[in-house]
């Protein structure tokens, strides 16, 4: 059994913004202890935002995630160095999903409603294990 994690790197987000991918890039993967490996995509500032236990393998998780989110092709961007599981997230889609969840729970969204990186991580975990 492994631990599914969602990690983010500020430097990778800045690079993504420079090359036209956008700054909302997240890494979804599986590890034994839930920690993101150091040095992914040449960056060392990765922080794990959310984790969940899973019994599925990484290929199945990424296949499920690709149905809802856009996975970045690591062969097209040499900086990623073959790193699978980098996801380009649309903040608008996450915001809409959260608003629908509020409506289904008969709750009013907060007045200063803003999507945070942890909300995006929970959204990615939900789509990956669904």
Image (cartoon, helix red, strand yellow):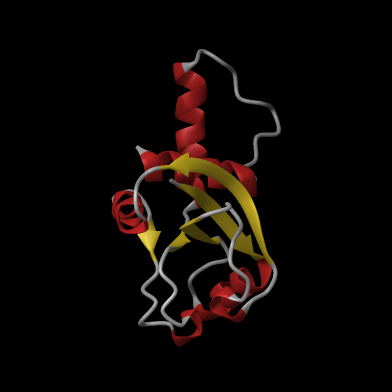
Quadrant for residue 116, please give it. top right
Residue 100, placed above or below residue 44: above
Residue 90's place in the image compared with 16, above or below, is above
Judging depth in this view, the residue of 37 and 97 nearest the camera is 37
Residue plotted at (49% across, 75% down): 20
State the image coordinates of residue 100 (x, y, percent, origin top left). 45, 27
Q: Residue visible at 44% across and 38% down?
A: 126
Q: Position of residue 25 (x, y in %)?
A: 53, 63
Classify the position of the C terminus by image quarter.
top left
Toward the top, the furthest residue is 106
Image location of residue 122, percent across then percent down: 53, 41
For residue 71, side relative to residue 4 (left or right): left
In the rendered image, the residue lying farthest to the bottom is: 78
Q: Position of residue 47 (x, y in %)?
A: 67, 59
| Left or right, residue 123 beside residue 130 | right
Which residue is painted at 68% across and 74% down in the image? 44
Between 108 and 72, the one lying in front of the other is 72
Quadrant position of residue 76: bottom left
Q: In screen coordinates, is 37 left or right of 69?
A: right
Depth order, front residue of 37/43: 37
Compared with 48, 108 (above or below) is above
């Amino acid at each position: 059994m492994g631990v599914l994690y969602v990690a983010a790197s500020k430097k990778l987000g800045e690079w993504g913004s420079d090359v036209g991918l956008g700054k909302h890039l997240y890494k979804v993967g599986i590890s034994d202890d839930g920690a993101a490996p150091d040095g992914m995509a040449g960056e060392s500032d990765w922080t794990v935002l959310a984790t969940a236990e899973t019994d599925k393998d990484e290929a199945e998780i990424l296949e499920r995630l690709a149905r809802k989110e856009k996975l970045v092709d690591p062969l097209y961007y040499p900086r990623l160095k073959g790193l699978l599981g980098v996801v380009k997230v649309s903040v608008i889609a996450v915001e809409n999903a959260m608003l629908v969840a509020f409506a289904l729970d008969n709750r009013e969204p907060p007045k200063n409603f803003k999507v945070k990186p942890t909300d995006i991580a929970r959204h990615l975990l939900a789509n990956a294990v669904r």
